Image (cartoon, rainbow, N blue to C red):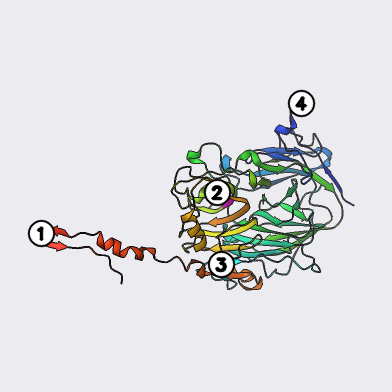
């Protein structure tokens, strides 16, 4: 039987209040976390394990092995350098080789038009909630990955993929490593108990979790079957958006991001490590657990964030601020000033703008939008937009609220109003055009196009004013000739 060992953060100065450095476990989340996105962290499950003032001593304490992990190039600017040193019972090279696994037909990585398994949609699309696996089919987190849309290809180090995970079984002696990209994971139903090389995280609906490229993890399902959304980015890492004139606070604040503390298990049984490489799955066997890191220090490690902590900003006079003010995390593309992906959320907040059409105005943006719903209603988005479902608009596809929502908004008393209480909607917004997979278009059985009839009553009200406009137009004298401007219906 494996023996699991963990401890509070060993880097807390003696005599200091622990709460200043870490969170307090509670019933729904038994784990402790270090706080602050972008910090340099260190953690020891056994105090005194980390070497003093160096990374790779001739001999480590307790016979541990030093293993470095880099998440950026060696010569990256100091502000962008991402690396971590781990001190583990056995190094990752102690394995028995790789075996190619059968393809998962619902998992996609190449989103270029040359791939006949992906499709372009000029119109809006929507999906009813995706079904969880049948009880008689054992499906863990890795087995349950289903790709919906994406752009680029991981071999190009540019692009992204949007997946659902649909699982009903915990991973046992099995771990997963995504060599293709960083994964932003959003449970929609059921918590995820995630064991990473750096420690444990309990992630509930309403929280996000980021696990970077190359990091091993396994997922248990403490609440039974689980469903959720994943955005995977191939050529970049997530970071906080710049605040500009907002100043130093607002949106998602660094102190609210939580990182695991060191935890390890002693287990000399057979394990399977599944690697995703350029969309292919490969299995690696070893005779010991991969979760044997006793201590670590660095900057390249997973984290989670409770989205209810987001500080919303918006107009307090008139009109709308751009939707970028709802951005929690962003990822750079190779083009300066143009994000590869922005992750946005929409939840409970005040709407107080005067003389303003308050719902999202009708628009055609250059960005592509892919939305999911974690909980609550999100009226006017489309017919059938429900938690566990999705909706999509490619760049420049015109969209906006239904006629009913438009009519209600134009006739409403514009008093200060709470909007989206009890709701959490998420959006994956990208500057790239997305293609849609075979699974999303056909095999899921959940696709339905937005019903265009929802806008049929948006008639040309302007035509009701033609007589008024003609009567109010007077003749104009110009060099002896009368000119009359008339507006006539065709």
Task: Name the quadrant containing residue 17.
Answer: top right
Indicate yes or no whether the magenta region holds residue 141.
no
The magenta stretch is: 343-347
Mark 4 vs 2: CB contact within 8 A: no
Query: What residue is rendered at 61% in x and 54% in y?
Result: 425
Q: Earlier in the sequence, mark 3 or mark 2?
A: 3
Residues at marks 3 and 4, CA–CA distance in whole angstroms: 57 Å
Question: Disc 4 or disc 2, which is closer to the eye?
Answer: 2
Q: Is residue 396 rendered to the left or right of residue 195?
A: left
Question: How many residues crowd around disc 4 within 10 Å: few (fewer than 14), some, or many (20 or more)?
Answer: few
Q: Which residue is mark 2?
A: 326
Q: Within 10 Å of the Cα at label 3, are there few (<14), some (14-19), or many (20+) other Cα atoms?
A: many
Q: Which mark is residue 15?
A: 4
The quarter of the rendered structure image containing the C terminus is bottom left
Instruction: Tell me if I can see residue 402 in this picture.
Output: no
Q: Toward the viewer: 319 or 466?
A: 466
In space, the residues marked 3 and 1 are separated at their CA atoms by 58 Å
């Amino acid at each position: 039987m494996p023996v699991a060992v963990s401890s509070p953060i060993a880097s807390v100065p003696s005599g200091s209040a622990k709460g200043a450095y870490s969170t307090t476990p509670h019933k729904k989340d038994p784990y402790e976390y270090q706080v602050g996105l972008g910090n340099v962290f260190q953690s020891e499950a056994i105090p005194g394990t980390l070497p003093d003032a160096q990374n790779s001593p001739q001999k480590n304490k307790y016979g541990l092995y030093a293993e470095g992990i880099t998440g950026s190039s060696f010569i990256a600017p100091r502000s962008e350098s991402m690396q971590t040193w781990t001190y583990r019972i056995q190094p990752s090279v102690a394995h028995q080789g790789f075996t190619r696994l059968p393809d998962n037909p619902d998992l996609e990585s190449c989103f270029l038009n040359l791939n006949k398994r992906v499709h372009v949609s000029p119109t809006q699309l929507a999906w009813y909630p995706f079904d969880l696996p049948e009880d008689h089919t054992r499906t863990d987190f890795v087995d349950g990955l289903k790709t919906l849309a994406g752009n680029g290809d991981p071999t190009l180090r540019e692009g992204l993929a949007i997946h659902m995970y649909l699982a009903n079984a915990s991973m046992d002696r099995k771990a997963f490593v995504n060599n293709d990209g960083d994964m932003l994971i959003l449970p929609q139903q059921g918590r995820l108990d995630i064991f990473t090389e750096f420690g444990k995280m309990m992630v509930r609906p309403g929280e996000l979790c980021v696990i970077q490229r190359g990091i091993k993890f396994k997922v248990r399902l403490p609440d039974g079957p689980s469903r959720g959304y994943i955005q995977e980015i191939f050529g970049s890492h997530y970071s906080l958006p710049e605040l500009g004139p907002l100043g130093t606070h607002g949106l998602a604040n660094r102190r609210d991001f939580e990182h695991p503390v060191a935890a390890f298990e002693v287990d000399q049984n057979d394990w399977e490590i599944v690697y995703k490489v350029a969309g292919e799955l490969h299995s690696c066997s070893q005779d010991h657990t991969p979760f044997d890191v006793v201590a670590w220090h660095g900057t390249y490690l997973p984290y989670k964030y409770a989205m209810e902590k987001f500080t919303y900003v918006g107009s307090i006079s008139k009109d709308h601020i751009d939707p970028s003010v709802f951005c929690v995390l962003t990822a750079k593309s190779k083009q300066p000033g143009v994000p590869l992906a922005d992750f946005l959320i929409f939840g409970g907040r005040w709407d107080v703008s005067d003389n303003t059409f308050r719902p999202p105005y009708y628009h055609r943006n250059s960005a592509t939008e892919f939305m999911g719903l974690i909980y609550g209603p999100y009226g006017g988005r489309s017919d059938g937009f429900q938690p566990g479902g999705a909706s999509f608009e490619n760049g420049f596809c015109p969209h906006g609220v239904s006629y009913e929502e438009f009519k209600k908004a134009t006739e409403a008393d514009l008093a200060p109003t709470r909007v989206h209480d009890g709701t959490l909607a998420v959006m994956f917004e990208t500057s790239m055009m997305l293609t849609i997979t075979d699974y999303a278009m056909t095999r899921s059985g959940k696709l339905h196009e937005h019903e265009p009839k929802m806008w049929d009553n948006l008639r040309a009200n302007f035509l009701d004013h033609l007589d008024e406009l003609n009567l109010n137009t007077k003749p104009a004298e110009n060099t002896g000739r009368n000119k009359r401007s008339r507006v006539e219906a065709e």
